[in-house]
Image: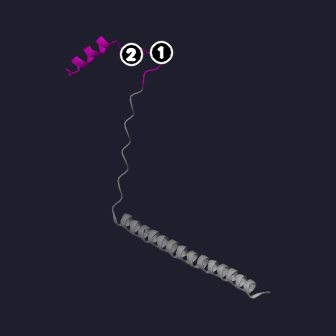
Amino acid sequence: MTKEDRNHAEARLNKITRAAADARSGKTDRDAGVKGVLDNMARLKALRLAREAAEPPRPAAAPRKARAKPNKPGEKSPALAEWLAGQQSGGRRT
């Protein structure tokens, strides 16, 4: 093995070693970031649960009014003149 071959092999080994070290440090950085996010989520959840426990219970929501049912396909709607007359007699004057 010549000196040049030895230098190439050593450079290749250094490159592989450096890549492995970079991967480890990158994983460590990612793990630290993930841990920070999870810690923050846990802290916020604890704050939310404490706030919800301190406030009085909310009353149940009132049921919604039923919508007017649309006309069935066989039913006819009133003529325009009849509808307008009903609007005027009901107090609408527009």
Q: Give the range drawn in magenta.
A: 70-94
Disc sitting over residue 74 in the figure: 1
**SS at badge 2:** loop
The residue positioned 42% from the left and 24% from the top of the image is: 70
Is residue 72 a member of the stretch shown in magenta? yes
**SS at badge 1:** loop
Alpha-carbon neighbours of circle 2 within 10 Å: few (<14), some, or many (≥20)?
A: few
Q: Name the residue under label 2.
A: 77
Residue type, mark 2 in image: Ser
Q: Is residue 58 above or below residue 89?
A: below
Q: In this view, does 93 lie to the left or right of 6?
A: left
Q: Which residue lies furthest to the right in this view?
A: 1
Is residue 69 a member of the stretch shown in magenta? no
- Where does the image place residue 61, in percent across and percent down from the top left? 37, 48
Q: In which quarter of the image is residue 12?
A: bottom right
**Magenta part mainly helix, strand or loop?**
loop
Q: Which quadrant is the N terminus positioned in?
A: bottom right
The residue positioned 41% from the left and 14% from the top of the image is: 76
- Taking depth in this image into account, of 87 and 29 the one nearest to the observer is 29
The residue positioned 44% from the left and 71% from the top of the image is: 40
- Where does the image place residue 55, in percent across and percent down from the top left? 33, 63
